[in-house]
Amino acid sequence: MISDVQLQDATGIREINSFLTKLPGVSEQNGYLSIRGGSADQTGMMVNGLAYNNAAVGNAETSIPLSAIEQVSLLSGGYNAEYGNFRSGLINVTTKSGNKDGYHGTFSYSRNTDHLRRFGPSFYDPHSPALRPFLDPDVAFVGTRDAWADDPYLQEQHLSFSGWNLAAQIYNMGKEPEDHATPLDYYLLGTWMHMAEPDYEGLAEQGYTVSEEHKRLFAEHQRQEGGVDWNFDGGFGGPLPLIGKYIGDATFYISNNSRERNYIMPVTRSNEKTYTTLATVKANPTESLSLTFNGLHKYQKGMSPIRPPWGDFPDASREGGFMPINNIKYIHKNPDYWYDQPFYPILEQNTLMGGLTINHILNSSMFWELTLSAMNIQNDSPTGNTRDNTVLTSFRSVSGV
């Protein structure tokens, strides 16, 4: 059993997942918890006796404000049938319900600095391993075979590319001179499509110049890795105002967690946003009768890891849910996904959960309890042609949008 004091004393803990994964036998799979090596759909989550599981993916939800948690029990087997058919384990959370003696609250806010979230150069650096064959001026125009003719190791370590000189030559065949494209046009278009910024010094050494207008547009269009993560967590509770004393000294506690986390590799969106609000009201109309109401709302906007029919087929590790913050594995295996960001659709999810628990003590050895709950999850993903086709610039006969 884990108390709220233990959670508060833990260094650098901003969400319950981060704490639980430090316990023996607990790990994380695509943002969901797994216990004793079982799959994530074999782990259950209960909040004040209410099942908190994402029916869309069949996994336990753990988006709960830390400020709301009073204690957490981690059960890895041998629990009662009332908790359902979870074979690996169960996370049972009890939240605060306020104190009738006065109002109390806790608030925390943290953020980090803008930084690259992995080792190595930026993916959008023209000299990065992924882009060097296409955007390094010393290589991109003549091609990897000619540029590294004396260095077979470099040829093996990079994608093969025949060069922009040859690409322009092939494109211009059979066209009128006024419709011709230069190798520089192709280079700039390739840089634009890669959402990078040209190596202007390297281009100058090759005898090429780029207009100031194009430099401005590239600076605005360039994709940046990094970003600032932030997290707010706060809760407040006490006697229920105005009507609390008339309904059994009712108390309340309301809490919120809001956070923004940036993906290691930016895709259609560069970050994921989550806002979770949890409210609990508890009353004791009589000494033997207690009523507890719980309400939760969560809004999450991020990316789905599912690719469309013409992409890779989905499997158990990719179906449903949100793309993990560490999303490198979804991108690095196939270069086709490096630059075609719409392969990964935006996903918005609204979750509403509510429940009422009535507990009546009949005598010293007998009681009855009734729990009513409902949960609704709505997913929305923009579909169709949502791309803005406004032409921002052109490189001779080709355009960048």
Image (spheres, rainbow, N blue to C red):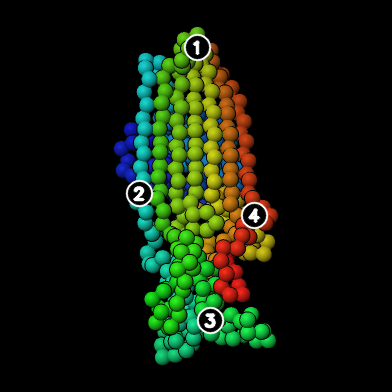
The percent position of residue 400, horizontal first and vertical second, equals 57, 67
Label 4 Cα crowd, 10 Å radius (few <14 / some 14-19 / many 20+): few
Q: How many labels does the image show?
A: 4
Say what secondary structure mark 1 lies in: loop
Give the CA separation, mark 3 to mark 4: 31 Å
Q: Earlier in the sequence, mark 3 or mark 1?
A: 3
**Residue topped by disc 4:** 386
**Residue topped by disc 3:** 183
Q: Residue at x 63, y 60 (%)?
A: 389
Q: Which of marks 2 and 1 is nearer the N terminus?
A: 2
Label 3 Cα crowd, 10 Å radius (few <14 / some 14-19 / many 20+): many
Q: What residue type is labelled 4?
A: Thr
Q: Look at the image and tell me in which quarter the N terminus lies.
A: top left
**Residue topped by disc 1:** 243
Q: In this view, does 158 lie above or below 335?
A: below
Between 225 and 216, the residue placed more toward the observer is: 216
